[in-house]
């Protein structure tokens, strides 16, 4: 069984999270500049056995949002570049709020919570955890 790689995709930054090989635990991986996303994905594909992708879906109540178009395009590009890897979209509503609460509860210093890349990668882990919970 491979690992699941999750994305909290954004126009400027993207958060990445990954599971363990048993696909039980969702862990924040890194926050990156979106312009570098394809290099990071390829590096991870070379170093990890990735079985699935999970992408946060910004549609609120079935309605498109400001970021829906760029995320739709990212999903199309991801599926085209890696057609053998299943791609799952998960509702990302309130993932940033939940990520901030998790960082506070986990004792992360305020200075580190202000770093948007940290928020993005923890948001990706929240999205990934939601996906894992729906599979049960």
Image: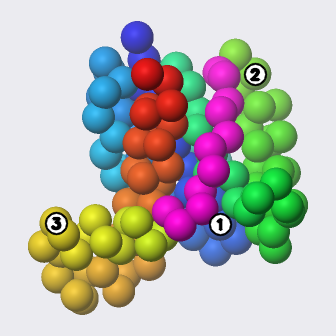
Quarter of the picture containing the C terminus is: top left
Q: Position of residue 90 (x, y in %)?
A: 62, 44
Which-is-in-front pick, marks 2 and 3?
A: 3
Q: Is residue 54 visible?
A: yes
Q: What percent of the width, then of the height, locates residue 8?
A: 56, 57
Q: For the point 67% across and 30% down, which residue is it?
A: 87
Q: Are marks 2 and 3 in contact (CB under 8 Å)?
A: no
The crowd level at tag 2 (other Cα within 10 Å; few <14, some 14-19, many 20+) is few
- Per the image, the residue denoted by label 2 is 83
Q: Which mark is residue 106?
A: 3
Q: Which mark is residue 21?
A: none
Indicate the secondary structure of the residue bearing disc 1: loop
Q: Is residue 115 above or below residue 130?
A: below
Q: Which residue is mark 1?
A: 10
Distance, label 3 to label 1, CA atoms, is 24 Å
Which residue is pictured at 74% across the width and 62% down the height?
60
Which residues, given as a range, are shown in magenta? 85-95
Earlier-in-chain disc, 2 versus 3: 2
Q: How many marks?
A: 3
Look at the picture and state if 29 lies above or below 122: above
Kindly identify the residue that appears in the image at 73 percent across and 38 percent down: 78
Q: Quadrant of residue 92?
A: bottom right
Give the mark nearest the N terminus, 3 or 1: 1
Q: Is residue 6 magenta?
A: no
Q: Is residue 26 above or below residue 22?
A: below
Instruction: Where is residue 96? Give x, y as percent.
Output: 48, 70
């Amino acid at each position: 069984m491979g690992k699941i790689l999750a994305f909290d995709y954004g126009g400027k930054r993207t958060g990445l999270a990954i599971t363990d090989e048993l696909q039980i635990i969702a862990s924040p991986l890194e926050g990156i500049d979106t312009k570098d996303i394809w290099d990071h994905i390829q590096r991870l594909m070379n170093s990890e056995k990735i079985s699935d992708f999970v992408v946060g879906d910004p549609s609120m109540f079935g309605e498109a949002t400001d970021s829906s178009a760029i995320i739709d395009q990212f999903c199309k590009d991801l599926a085209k570049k890696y057609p053998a890897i299943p791609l799952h979209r998960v509702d990302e509503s309130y993932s940033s709020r939940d990520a901030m609460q998790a960082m506070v509860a986990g004792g992360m210093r305020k200075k580190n919570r202000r770093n948007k890349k940290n928020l993005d990668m923890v948001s990706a882990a929240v999205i990934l955890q939601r996906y894992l919970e729906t599979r049960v």
